[in-house]
Image (cartoon, rainbow, N blue to C red):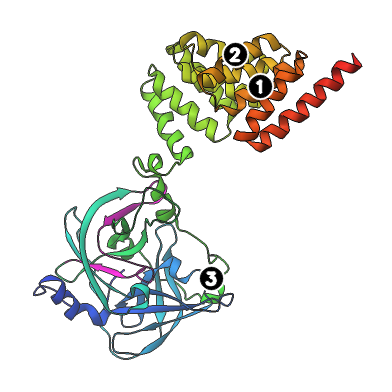
Amino acid sequence: MATGGCVSGANTTGAEGVYREQRGAVVTVVTYDPDKAMPQVSSGFFAAVDRVVTARHALAGADRAEVRTADGQTIAVRGILAENQTMDVVMVEVALGGPRRGARLAEEPPRVGQKLVAIGAPLGLESTVSEGLVSGIREVPDAGQAVQHTVAVSPGSSGGPLFDLSGRVVAIQTGTITAGGDRNITAGQSLNFAVPARYIRELVPGSLRPLGEARKEVAADWVPAVTRNVDRLSLRPFMRDDFGGAAAYFQKRVEQLPQEADAWFRLGLCRERMSDWAEAVSAYRKCLELDGKHYVAGNNLGQVHLREGRNREAAAAFRGALAAKSDYVEALTGLAMACNHLKQHSEALEAAEKAVRLNEKQTVAHLALGQACAAMGDRERAMKQVRVLEKLDGNMAEQLKKMISGSATTRKSE
């Protein structure tokens, strides 16, 4: 893609110079979704007198749009000329609104540590300038290359150009990692992402497509792959409890280091959290083959078998964990539950008693102890566990009462 009316930035110095020379090339993009009361605001820039580049997601759900120029004109968007949905880049045609000069695209790729200047409309504040630097070049899985940077951005910045100090467009802003529900991210950490200029250059204008037609292809809540798959970068899955992403990491790890027991354990843990029981069992067993004393893997294997209703296998796994660590409360509790299911109540009683001695607040152990006592005809002791549970977990106390009542009925019928 060639840009028309290019301006040289050879004499531009610093953010002030970039702003002075390039402000006129930057636009605010206002889009209208018929299903929403308020218009959406983003940013963009002139690539030629009648062409504007912005982020594709900025147009998602819109059936019409307009751009506002730095000198106050409002110009209608006629439609889409070219797009790369994977990389979140789009070129639109706009009505002629007077002589314009397009911003020049940088020829060379961005460099880590390179200074950047953004001009855009963060939170609707048009012609805002901010600066930062390239903090990383990332290969986003199933997408392409993204520029990680520290330039301050906000909603409304999407689609806006990131300039080098010569006033050339290095990239356009597309996404950011914000606090949201992620406990590991706080405001001000500048984890922002942009798409390099080469993807803009690769756009090939075609026939004009009205926004109303394109709206059918991209829903309002659409997230492009280059943004969505940032969560798969590097070790980021570890920082956001992304067990699917972590499982992919540990799968590669066990392929590279098949004798590493801990890698198999963590793969099993990820699969367990994903409710992929068969794969979890397979990974935990492999861990135990390599390290028979890995009592946590043994306990987790038992817990998976309990969920599957495979109580005999569960009991065996818990016994194996306890052989490695006899005071492991979780395994004692699991063994008590499994043995109660198997009607091996004496062993259940013994395991549960030890578990509550070690941790008097282990509610499931009290439940298992009460169940074993009731099954063995010791109603008084079973009710004692109800009273303990009433202070710890009312719902579990009611559950035990029902078990005791059921055991009494069964014993009478016998």
Residue 35 visible: yes
Amino acid type of the residue that numbered disc 2 sits on in the rendered structure: Ala
Residue behind mark 1:
368
- Circle 2/circle 1 CB separation < 8 Å: yes
- Circle 1/circle 3 CB separation < 8 Å: no
Between marks 1 and 3 in the image, the one whose residue lies nearer the viewer: 1
- Find residue 114 and report its horizontal and vertical position in percent: 16, 58
Residue at 69% across, 28% down? 386
Residue 145 part of the magenta segment: yes
For the stretch drawn in magenta, the main secondary structure is: loop
Tell me the magenta residue range: 140-164
Nearer-the-camera pick, 141 or 117 = 117
Say if 285 sits above or below 80 in the image.
Answer: above
Spatial CA span between label 2 and label 3:
60 Å
Residue at 46% across, 28% down? 267
* Quadrant (top left, top right, bottom left, bottom right) of the N terminus: bottom left
Spatial CA span between label 1 and label 3:
55 Å
Amino acid type of the residue that numbered disc 3 sits on in the rendered structure: Gly
Which residue is farthest right?
413
Q: Give the mark nearer the N terminus: 2 vs 3.
A: 3
- Find residue 144 and report its horizontal and vertical position in percent: 36, 51
Residue at 61% across, 17% down? 352
Spatial CA span between label 2 and label 1:
9 Å
Query: Helix, strand or loop at disc 1?
Result: helix
Answer with left or right where residue 401 lies relative to residue 49: right
Amino acid type of the residue that numbered disc 1 sits on in the rendered structure: Ala
Residue 261 part of the magenta segment: no
Query: Helix, strand or loop at disc 3?
Result: loop
Q: Give the mark nearer the N terminus: 2 vs 1.
A: 2
